[in-house]
Amino acid sequence: MSDSLMKTTGLTKTYTIGNVQTHALNGVSMEIPAGSFSCIIGPSGHGKSTLMHLIGGLDRPTSGEVEIEGVRISDLSDSQLSQLRADKIGFVFQFFNLLQNLTAVENIETAMMFGNGVSQSVKRKRARALELLELVGLADKADNKPSELSGGQQQRVSIARSLANDPDILLMDEPTGNLDSKSEAEVLEQLFKIHATGKTIVIVTHNTELADMAQIVYTIKDGKLESVKEKSG
C-alpha cells in the first residue's frame, strides 16, 4: 500500500449526558493508506460512525489526534476545518441527503459553492456536474428531481455530488444500506470504477460482502480498534 493519507492516534470520543458518560471511541489508532479501498465494520452502536465523523472533521475528538495529509486537524479553526473538508473530502450517507427541490445536476452544482469549485464559472460548473453524472451512468437523468429517481439512482447522484470538488478522499456511511440488491450492485459498480481513478475510499458498513471486497478491513468493537485485516497482493 501507499503512504498514509489519514492517521489517528489515541482517538477518544466521550459524550456526557447528565452524570452519565458514554465512551463512543476509546483510544483508536489507525492509518489509512492513500489510494486504498477500506471498510470499517463492527456491531451497531460500537463507534463506527463516530469514527467516520471524526476522521472526516465533522466532529472533534475528546482527546487524541486526526491527521490528514500530515495536517493535524485539531489545530485548525472551524473555518479552516470547513475548508479542508470542502477541498479534500467527499461524503456519502445512507439516506442520500439530496435537496428535493433541485434536479440531479443542480444538486451537484450546489456542492461546488464550496471548496475547489467555488471560483468556477457557471458554465464550467454545469459542464463538471454533467461529467460526473456521466461517470455514474446518469447523464440522461440530469434534469430529474430526487423524487423522480430510484433509490440506487439517488445514491449515484450523491456519489457524483461527493466528487464535485475532486476530493482525495471519499467517506461513506452505509452507502448501500438503504438499497435493494439491484441498486446496491449498481452503486458498488460505480464505487469500484471511482476507486480505480486513484481515490481513497473508506466505507462504514454492515455489508459483509462489501467488506470482503475491500483491501483493508478495520473492525471496531466497544469503541476500540479490534483488528485490521489487509489483503495481500
Image (cartoon, rainbow, N blue to C red):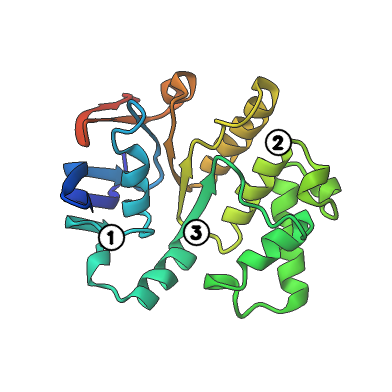
For discs 3 and 1, the disc positioned in front in the rendered view: 1
Residue annotated with mark 2: 151
Is tag 2's residue or tag 1's residue first in the polypeptide sequence? 1
Q: Which residue is mark 3?
A: 167
Going 44% across and 31% down the picture, which residue do you hit?
Answer: 205
- Say which of 123 and 53 sits in front: 53
Of helix, strand and loop, which one carries label 2? helix
Look at 57% across and 43% down and name the residue there. 194
In which quarter of the view is residue 49 placed?
A: top left
Q: Earlier in the sequence, mark 3 or mark 1?
A: 1
Residue at mark 3 to residue at mark 1: CA–CA distance: 21 Å
Query: Relative to residue 155, is residue 14 depicted above or below?
Result: below
- Considering only order in the chain, which callout, 3 or 2, is on the residue closer to the N terminus? 2
On-image quarter of the C terminus = top left
Lateral position of residue 207 relative to residue 224, left or right: right
Quarter-of-image position of residue 202: top left
Residue 99 percent across, percent down from the top left: 69, 57
Question: Quick check: 105 above or below 141?
Answer: below
Residue situated in front as seen by the camera: 165 or 11: 11
